Image (spheres, grey):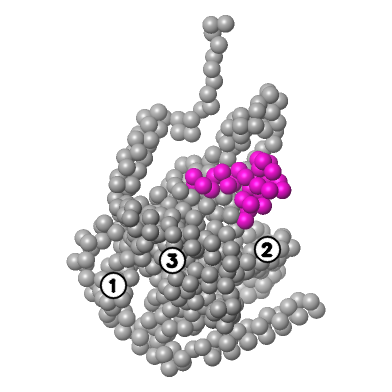
Amino acid sequence: MGDSVSWSPPPLIRNPWLRYGLYIGAAIYLSLALGTLHLNWARLAQGLDRGWAFISAFAHPDIAKHGREIFEGFVESLTMTAVATAAGVAISLPVGLGAARNLVPMPVYLLCRGIIAVSRTFPEIIVAILFVKMFGFGPLAGVATLAFATIGFMSKLLAEDIEDIDASQVEAIRATGAGPFQVLNYAVQPQVMARFIGLSVYRLDINFRESAVIGIVGAGGIGATLNTSFERYEFDTAASILLMIIGIVMVTEYASSLVRGRLR
Amino acid sequence: MAIWACWLVTVLALVQCWNILNENTIWDFVYDAPAQAGDLIGRMFPPRWSVLPSLWQPLWDTVNMATLGTLLGVVIGVPVAFLAARNTTPSVLLARPLALTAIVSSRSINALIWALLLVTVLGPGVLAGIIAIGLRSIGFVGKLLYEAIEEVDTKQVEAIEATGASGPQRLIYAIVPQIMPAFAGIAVYRWDINIRESAVLGLVGAGGIGLQLNASVSRLAWPEVTVIFAAILVTVFLSEWVSAQVRKRII
């Protein structure tokens, strides 16, 4: 029985030099990164009490104390979400069409891709800071931020969908003597519409989540209420807001998956 | 007919939304927005490049927050994914709903809100940022990974089971090899997103370059803001490039 062979699964990275090099590099990086943490244990110990206070606040969330503010915050957030999604989707239609290489000439393509790149590069919260400076505090800055982010997201995905469409259908419509708008309407639109609607619903869902955040820098919505409640250490109010956000996100996520499922 | 009813409801809702928005907006501020934008751009240029040397440390912190946060998210997210996947969960009645709830809660709350919370609990600093990024990543990693686990090829699982493998052996030899590429892709993709997120976490006090950004914006030092934006942009582009390269190699 001396020649029993033990088998082990092949490693993910085949080259042993690269594999062990990566392990060692990762170890060095980890020790360096952990070394710069500067943990303040006294402050952490103090924080544990507060952490526990917050966790226990989830057991008795308090909506009543600041009920009006919470209600207004959510109405504002939902309003911002709806308007921004509608405006963003409406604007992203022409931009997305212009960014599809198989439909438009090169200059238009570059311009639209440029718009998409600008919109996708900056995190929402930074855009929100700039819009708050421009439009003043309030939900309009939030709407502008969310619409701006929606344009990049929707246009990019729409353009990619259009670039992937079946070219023979476009040719068939063109062969009947159709103009560019007829080609759009009868060859392109039927192929991408279902997915476009699905993506819009998905973006609605994302925009609501983001609307809860951009209030932190003054762009309106529930984020502002949440920020205030943290600053006052009113954990019971904060917990109730967080639970409501989770609840609404669950509902919208379920609804959007339902809509997308029916479209497919 | 139903479609037109849908359109009608949508338009009515939007009009109502616009009314609410209109009430809460001070239009005088909006009318001079173009002037404000011009003023802003005028103030942002020329950039004050002399602040660049003081940005290396915060940038290093930002990358660390993203990396360690991703690590934390992966370490917790992977077991959660195995609990949530229908074909690996120990109990469909108890463990699966719990894991799914954890995933949804983590996904629905943005890293900035987690950071806001953790800064009040743990005090400002990089640690709050790492945990915030980690908590947000659990849901992302968990969701994508459990979907990958549910889609594994059942033939390989059956083949391993036919050799008399135990539960853990079934996981290691039949399921893990199949989801490994997906897992690596998900982790790198999340890391890339986390770089973006950790760049702004400082706005609520959680360390990194966002802290500098917040300080400069509060002092209205717009020439410095330009430099910080540039630093964030370059970092984001680099991380996107790295992540794209790694994912290309894997897939």
Residue named by callout 3: B116
Q: Secondary structure at mark 1?
A: helix
Query: Which amino acid is tagged 3?
Result: Leu
**Structural distance between the alpha carbons of marks 1 and 3:** 19 Å
Packing grade of label 3 (10 A; few <14, some 14-19, many >=20) is many
**In this orientation, which residue lies closer to the viewer: B17 or A86?**
B17
Does the magenta segment cover residue B78? yes
Mark 1 touches mark 2? (CB < 8 Å): no
Q: Residue A24 magenta-drawn?
A: no
Q: Chain of mark 2?
A: A
Q: Residue at x 48, y 30 (%)?
A: A11
Instruction: In the displayed orientation, state which residue is furthest to the left.
Output: B50
Locate residue B198, reporting x and y percent. Answer: 40, 59
Looking at the rendered image, the quarter that the C terminus of chain A falls into is bottom right
Q: Are marks 1 and 3 in contact (CB under 8 Å)?
A: no
Secondary structure that dominates the magenta span? helix
> As rendered, which of B61 and A127 lies closer to the eye?
B61
Question: What is the chain identity of the residue bearing mark 1?
Answer: B
Question: Is A33 placed left or right of A94 in the picture?
Answer: left
In this picture, which residue range is highlighted in magenta?
A: B74-101
What is the number of the mark on residue B216? 1
Relative to B200, B151 lies left or right: right
- Amino acid carrying label 1: it is Ser
What is the quadrant of residue B4 in the picture?
A: bottom right
The N terminus of chain A is located in which quarter? top right
The kind of residue tagged 2 is Tyr
Q: Are marks 2 and 3 in contact (CB under 8 Å)?
A: no
The mark found on residue A254 in the picture is 2
